[in-house]
Image (cartoon, coloured by chain):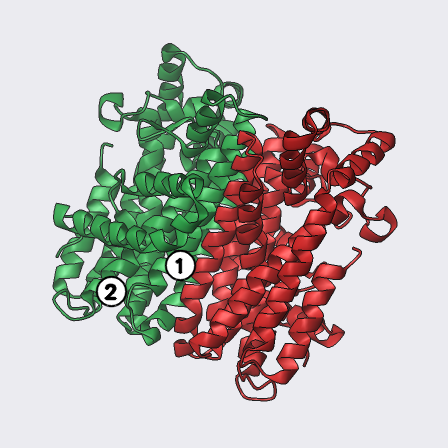
Chain colours: A red, B green
Amino acid sequence: MKAGTPAFVQAVEAALTDFFRTRRAAVEPLGPVFVQAAETLVLFVLRGGKRTRPAFAWTGWLGAGGDPTGPDAAAVLKACAALELVQACALIHDDIIDSSRTRRRFPTVHVDFEQRHRDRGWAGDSEHFGTSVAILIGDLALAWADDMVHASGLEPAAIARFAPVWALMRTEVLGGQLLDINGEAGGDESVAAALRINRYKTAAYTVERPLHLGAAIADAEPRLVEDYRTFGTDIGIAFQLRDDLLGVFGDPAVTGKPSGDDLREGKRTVLIAEALQRADRTDPDAAALLRASIGTDLTADEVEHLRAVLTGLGAVDEVERRITDLTEQGLAAIESSSATQAAKQQLRAMALAATRRAA
Amino acid sequence: MKAGTPAFVQAVEAALTDFFRTRRAAVEPLGPVFVQAAETLVLFVLRGGKRTRPAFAWTGWLGAGGDPTGPDAAAVLKACAALELVQACALIHDDIIDSSRTRRRFPTVHVDFEQRHRDRGWAGDSEHFGTSVAILIGDLALAWADDMVHASGLEPAAIARFAPVWALMRTEVLGGQLLDINGEAGGDESVAAALRINRYKTAAYTVERPLHLGAAIADAEPRLVEDYRTFGTDIGIAFQLRDDLLGVFGDPAVTGKPSGDDLREGKRTVLIAEALQRADRTDPDAAALLRASIGTDLTADEVEHLRAVLTGLGAVDEVERRITDLTEQGLAAIESSSATQAAKQQLRAMALAATRRAA
C-alpha cells in the first residue's frame, strides 16, 4: 500500500476508528457528558485531512525495508496513524491560541462548546467554558496518541526505538508553537526567527520526525536516518514557504481561504521578514507601509497593493529561490540514500506535491 | 525507602531533576524563549508538593513484592515520579480553567506569562498570551510524563503492563475534569454527580490508579490489584470529602486558605449537594439561602451563618459518616489482601493521614 493513495487514507482512518472503539470501556463509565466530549474528538479526527504525517512515517518505514505484506505491517500502520492524534491536540489548542472560529468549515472545538453553553443558558462565561472544554479535549488527544502507540501491537523493542524520536517530535512542535506566539507578541521580524519557527513547528513535525519514526520502527541504519532528516527538514521548510506564498498570492477558489488572509492576520512569515529586511535597506516608505498595514483589516485593493510591494521588493523571488534550493537539496539527499527505489520515487512525488502545489 | 519520608520526596525530586537534564538537548536548539518556558515547568514541578501519587505507586510496587534494594528499583522510582508531570499538566490547565491567580503563593503559570507580556509592553492581549503559553507548557508536561516513563529504564515488558493502566488513569482524570466543569456550568446539584467527579477526578487519579500502576510494574496477581483498587477508590473519595469539609470549616492558620473559600468559589461538593438535598426535603428557606449565597462574595459573618446552616441540616455529620465508612471499607480491603505487611502498615498510615488531616 502506497502512502497518499485513497486506500492508505482509508486504512489510517480505519485504524483510528478501531482505536476509538477500544477507548469506550474507559469513557462510558464516566457518563454521557464525557461520552459526548470524546465523540467530539472522534468526529474531529475522522472529519478528514490528508493524513500527511502518517504518510511520511509509513513511507519512512517502507523505505528502510519495512514489508507492507509482512506480519508487522498492521501494527506499524496503527503507530503511524497515532500521529493524527498528536495533530488533533495541536490543532484544537492552536485554534484556541489563534482565536480561530472555524476549521474545515466547521466551528472549532472551543467555539462549538461555547455555543452549546450559550444555547443551554448555562451559568458562567460561555467563551471561557468553550476554551476550558477544548483544553481538556486537546489533552485527551495528546494522551490518546501515546496510548495508541502502546496499543498498536508494535513489539516492545520497536516501541523502545520509537519512543525517543516521538519524544523529540512532541517537544519540538510545542517549542515551535511557543516560539511562534512569542515572536508574534514580541515583534521579532528577523528572517532567522521565521525560519526557526518553520523548522520546528512545521518541518520537524510534519516531515522530518515522521520519516525518522518510520525509520526507527524499521531499525534503519544511522546513515539513512540522516538522509531522511535532511530531506525532511528541507522539504518541510519548503512546504511552509509555499504555504506562506499561497497565503498571500493564492487563488481563493483553489485554496478555500479568502485572498490575502495571511496579511490580514498579520502572520510573521519568512516572506514578510524577507520583505521587511529588504525594505529597511532600500525603501523606508515601503517598510513603514508594511509595518502599518499588516495585521489590519485590509480591503481587497490594499491587499492587491501590498502584493505588488512584496513582489517589487524581490521578496517573492527570494522565497521562490529558497523553495527551489531546498527542494533540490532535499531531493539530492534522498536520491543518494539507501532508501528503496519505491520509497525514493514516492518521496520525490510527495516533495514536489508539497512544494509546487496551488492549494 | 518508605514512601512519604523526606528521603522519598528527595528521591522523587532527584529523579525529576535528572530527567529534566536529559531534555536539554531537545530544548536548547530552539533558543532562549523555549529554554525559559521549559525552565518555568521545571521550577513549577520542583517547587514542592507532597509527591502523593508517586508515593502510592511506589507503595503499590513494594506491597506486590517489589524489592527496594533490587536492580529495578531506580527505574521504578523514575516511572513513579513521572506521575508528577501528569499532575503538573493537570494543575497548569486547571488553573486556566478555574481562573486561579496563585498557587502555593506563586503566580499561576498563565498569570506569570500574562505579567511578563504586560511588563514588556508586547503586542496583543496579555491575558490571552498568558493562557496560550500555559496551554503549551501544560501540553509539554503531559508529553514529558510519557517520555519519562519510556526513559525510566523499566524493562519493555513492565512498560507494556504499565501502559494500559497509565492510559486509563489519564483518560479518567481528564474525564473527571470535564464532568466537573460541566456540572458547574449545568448546575447539576445531585450527590451522585458530586461523588462521580470525586471518583474520577480525585480517587482514581490520586490513589487507585497510582497503586494499580505500582502493581502492574510488579506483575501483581489480579486479586491484589482488586484489593488495591477498592482501597484506592474508598480512601481517595474519603480524602476528597475531608478536603470538602476543610474548604468550609478548616482553620485558615492551618490550611493556608481563607476561611470558607470553597463557599465563595461556589464549589459543587458532596457536602453542598447533601445539604441541598436535605434542605429541599425539610427546610425550603435554607435551600433558597444556600442557592442564593454560595458562589458569591460572602462576608465572614455570612460564612459563619452558612456553616451553621450546613451543620444544622445534618450534612456535616453525613459527610463525616461517609468518611468513616469509606475509610473502614478501604482499610478492610487492604488488611485482608496479599500485600506485604510493611505495605499494609504504610497504606494504613497514608489512609489515616489523608482522611483525618486538619490541612
Callout 1: residue from which chain? B
Give percent across and percent down for residue A272.
Answer: 67, 39
Q: According to the image, label 2 marks what residue?
A: B75
Quick check: B17 left or right of A191? left
The residue lying toward the viewer, choosing from B216 and A182, is A182
Give percent across and percent down for residue A145.
Answer: 52, 61
Quick check: B276 left or right of B82? right
Q: Is residue B132 above or below residue A172?
A: above
Q: Residue at x 45, y 21 (%)?
A: B119
Q: CA distance from mark 1 to mark 2?
A: 14 Å
The N terminus of chain A, quarter of image: bottom right
Give percent across and percent down for residue B206.
Answer: 34, 50
Dot 2 alpha-carbon crowd within 10 angstroms: few under 14, some 14 to 19, many 20 or more: some
Query: Which residue of the protein is positioned furthest toward the front in this rendering?
Result: A282
First-in-chain label (1 vs 2) = 2
Q: According to the image, label 1 marks what residue?
A: B146
